[in-house]
Amino acid sequence: MRDPVWKDIEQELKREIPVDPAAVQRVMRRIRESPQPSWPVRAWHWFVRPRPVRISPLVGTLAAAAVAALLLVSARGPAGPPHRPGGRPLP
Amino acid sequence: MSDVSDAELVRQIQGGDAERYAALVQRHYGACLRFGLRMLGNPQDAEEAVQDTFVRAFRSLHRYQDRDRFRAWLFRILVNQCRSVLRRQQRRSRLFVPYELAEAAEPLEPADPCWGTAVQRALQQLSPPLREALLLRCVEELSYEEIAESTGAGASAVKMRAMRAREQMRRLLQEKQNA
């Protein structure tokens, strides 16, 4: 059961405060009057802002496989001279 | 307008449509003013803190990333703004007059002005960290994690503060309520 004293306190604290209708306009006026950041600054923030990326499990698996294949190929390095079955390099 | 989410509005503003910010201000101004008024105790300071909060939020909006929690982010700025005003109030050694709230702002007059004044008076007796925690949790209904981010305290400390604040308010007002 809820505490009746607290219920009355909460009700009073949650009472809505009437807002001056001009208040929003005052905020917007201050914003319009304030200088905007220059375009390089805005462009930089646009570039560095992380974004959520959604991919399907299939695409995720394919991407992981592609990365693994790339790593494997680069680890093997460039192909050397062909070898004889005995192990000696061909002349 | 009202069915557009905060996240969508933020996206539009970040895309360059600054005028859409008015919709966000309209949506959150009342709650911010209520918090400011309860925290600071006088309408002028509250209004100033809220106005500054919205201007600061707009200027920082290009850095805002967590689009789904705009309200919590806004309250984080407001909490800092209120703390600055509280420090200024302390420097000026201006004493809070509890009944100023009911007198100066006529629309605030509750059904029972004595009860409203008593609640505000009790609130002012709490330390600012307790007041913050109580208002953000019980009035603005932010999660403990969001309050922790807003106030810089740990989630468990916030939980404890909210509980202590609630208990103190209850104790301070129980006699009044019984009367």
Image (cartoon, coloured by chain):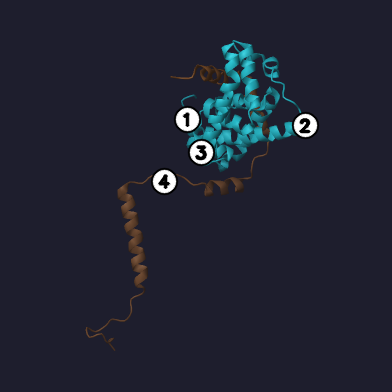
Q: Which residue is mark 4?
A: A53
Label 4 SS: loop
* Tag 2 near tag 1, CB within 8 Å: no
The reply to whether dot 1 and dot 4 touch (C-beta < 8 Å) is: no
Q: Which residue is mark 1?
A: B5
Report the chain holding disc 1: B
Same chain for the residues under marks 2 and 3 in the image:
yes
Hey, which residue is sitting farthest right in the picture?
B92
Q: Which chain is brown?
A: A
**B6, above or below A69, in the image:** above
Q: CA distance from mark 4 to mark 3?
A: 32 Å
Chain shown in cyan: B
Distance from Cα at disc 2 to Cα at disc 3: 33 Å
Where residue A89 appears, x then y in whole percent? Answer: 28, 86
Q: Chain of mark 4?
A: A
Q: Is residue A77 left or right of residue B133?
A: left
Foreground of the two, A74 or B154: B154
Q: Looking at the image, do the residues carrying marks 2 and 3 touch, with CB atoms under 8 Å apart?
A: no
Q: Which residue is mark 2?
A: B92
Is disc 3 surrounded by few (<14), some (14 to 19) or many (20+) residues within 10 Å? few
